[in-house]
Image: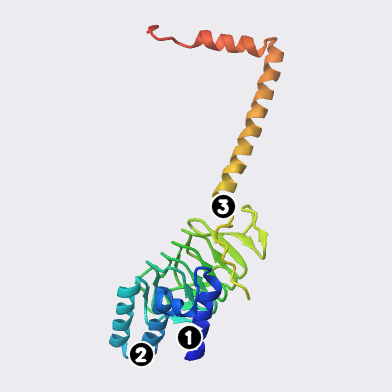
Amino acid sequence: MFDRLRKDIRAVMERDPAAKSVLEVVLCYPGLHAVLMHRLAHGFFRRGWFVIARLISQFARFITGIEIHPGARIGEGFFIDHGSGVVIGETAEIGDNVTVYQGVTLGGTGKEKGKRHPTIGNNVMISAGAKVLGSFTVGDNVRIGAGSVVLKAVPSDCTVVGVPGKIVVMDGHKVDPRQAPGEVNLRHDQLPDPVTDVLVCMHKSIERLEKRVRELEDQNLQLAGLRREELTGCRERCFLKDGDL
């Protein structure tokens, strides 16, 4: 128990540059408080003392703003940064060295019984406001961008962003959107944006089409023996002006 506690404290000290001392972490970090109370509640839950387990989890929610169902399984080195609005469902499973930011939800998508929440691998970083919904697995060394909504399984060593979540980096290489799809990386400010990539591609395609249209117009004008300036003047004369009707 004390070994796990040391690992949880060490995780905070390593991943939060604002942490100045162990005493500050122990006394002032709601993410650590929520994890410690969850481990206590989970022990009661495993022994079938469900009401006591839920009371502990509700008390933890009241004082930290973090809701972790006592049935959730959480590995070592779990770090919740800030933590307000974090929700972790009953059948969620979280590996070792996972980092979660405020507003994250590990939730289900229906009323079915049994396994209905995600399984998170080791060394995963889930950014602020991300939602991981459903019974599937998120592999090891995965980064999930802020505000993303993940609805299907994610292989290891990937970066996921968007709504719904799309894999944009796999094994350290950027994923072409036309293709089929130990250390925790916390740089969630350096994630690619697939929407911007698509808009840039569309802009380049439009520019190519406009250039081609102008070339075809010039060819037709040459065949007709006209200049572009003459065509423009003709168009202006053809437009109805105010008061013509």
Say whether marks 3 and 2 touch (CB < 8 Å).
Answer: no
First in residue order: circle 3 vs circle 2? 2
How packed mark 2 is, by other alpha carbons closer than 10 Å (few <14, some 14-19, many 20 or more), is some
- Mark 1, mark 3: which one is toward the viewer? 1
- x and y percent of residue 43 in the render? 39, 89
First in residue order: circle 1 vs circle 3? 1
Q: Nearer the viewer, residue 168 or 212?
A: 168
The colour mode here is rainbow
**Residue type, label 3:** Asp
Label 2, on which residue? 44
**Residue type, label 2:** Phe
Task: Report whether residue 97 is seen.
Answer: yes
Residue found 61% across the figure and 35% down from its top: 206
When the figure is inspected, residue 241 is found, relative to residue 89, above or below; the finding is above
* Secondary structure under the numbered disc 1 in the rendered image: helix
Q: Is residue 230 left or right of residue 71?
A: right
Label 3, on which residue? 193
Residue found 59% across the figure and 48% down from its top: 197
Label 1, on which residue? 5
Mark 3 to mark 2 CA distance (whole Å): 43 Å
Say whether marks 2 and 1 touch (CB < 8 Å).
Answer: no
Q: Nearer the viewer, residue 221 or 207?
A: 207
- x and y percent of residue 26 in the render? 43, 80
- Mark 2, mark 1: which one is toward the viewer? 1
- x and y percent of residue 118 in the render? 47, 73
- x and y percent of residue 235 in the render? 55, 12
Q: Is residue 156 left or right of residue 222?
A: left
Q: Quadrant of the C terminus?
A: top left
**Residue type, label 1:** Leu
Q: Is residue 60 left or right of residue 217?
A: left
